[in-house]
Image (tube, rainbow, N blue to C red):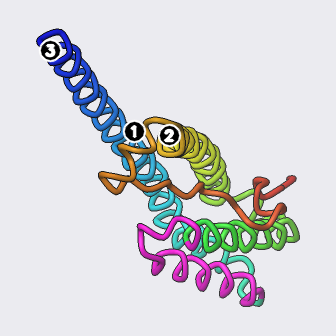
């Protein structure tokens, strides 16, 4: 009888130990996803902050190209209004903003003076750098989300995840394949 109680005690301690370890791993992964999303959010904010200056620079040269300028402004506003927790909505809005920026740069190709403008070149370089950083942040976020999702779905950690209401994270994906590419600008 005493051996049975010892075995039962050891088994209970093992199960409790596993639950603690699995719970802590899930918490760590959830925090990594939050940190990764924060990285994306920072880069998207940097891009959103750069856009008004870019638009003002282009306005001086291409005043009659109001549609392209209006589209970028409208898409930027839409993207900023999407709640930070809405990953899919934010991805869609940012994809539309990327397309509008691509159209703006395509319009800018028609203006040699604009292309020669130091301000425009600086904004273009900054925007390309930010787009690259957004891509890196998105990869990091999606990797963190993948790790959490695997842990939430894998047995036996899924039992702990369900008990403590851990949920899968959405991936930050652009819906439109053309939005996946950097705006192509050639001078």
Distance from label 1 to label 2 (Cα)? 7 Å
What residue do we see at 74% from left, 82% from top? Answer: 68
Residue designated by label 1: 29
Instruction: Select label 3 or label 2 by which is in front.
Output: 3
In this rendering, the answer to whether 39 lies above or below 51 is: above
Quadrant assignment, res 184? bottom right
- Which dot marks residue 144? 2
What residue do we see at 43% from left, 37% from top? Answer: 157
Circle nearer the N terminus (3, 1): 3
Quadrant assignment, res 137? top right
Start-end of magenta stretch? 65-89
In the image, residue 104 lies in the stretch drawn in magenta: no
**Residue found at the very far left of the displayed protein:** 2
Distance from label 3 to label 1 (Cα)? 42 Å
Q: Are marks 3 and 1 in contact (CB under 8 Å)?
A: no
Label 3: which secondary element: loop
Label 1: which secondary element: helix
Residue designated by label 3: 1
């Amino acid at each position: 009888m005493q051996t049975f109680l010892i075995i039962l005690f050891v088994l209970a301690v093992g199960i409790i130990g596993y639950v603690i370890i699995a719970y802590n791993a899930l918490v760590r992964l959830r925090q990594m996803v939050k940190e990764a999303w924060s990285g994306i959010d920072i880069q998207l904010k940097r891009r959103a902050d750069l856009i008004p200056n870019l638009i003002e620079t282009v306005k001086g040269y291409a005043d009659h190209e109001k549609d392209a300028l209006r589209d970028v402004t409208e898409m930027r506003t839409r993207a900023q209004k999407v709640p930070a927790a809405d990953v899919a909505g934010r991805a869609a809005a940012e994809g539309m903003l990327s397309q509008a920026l691509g159209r703006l740069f395509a319009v800018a190709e028609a203006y040699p003076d604009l292309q020669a403008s130091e301000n425009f070149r600086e904004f273009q370089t900054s925007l390309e750098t930010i787009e690259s950083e957004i891509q890196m942040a998105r990869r990091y976020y999606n990797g963190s989300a993948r790790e959490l999702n695997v842990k939430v779905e894998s047995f036996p950690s899924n039992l702990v995840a369900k008990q403590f209401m851990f949920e899968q994270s959405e991936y930050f994906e652009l819906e439109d394949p053309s939005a996946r590419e950097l705006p192509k600008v050639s001078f």
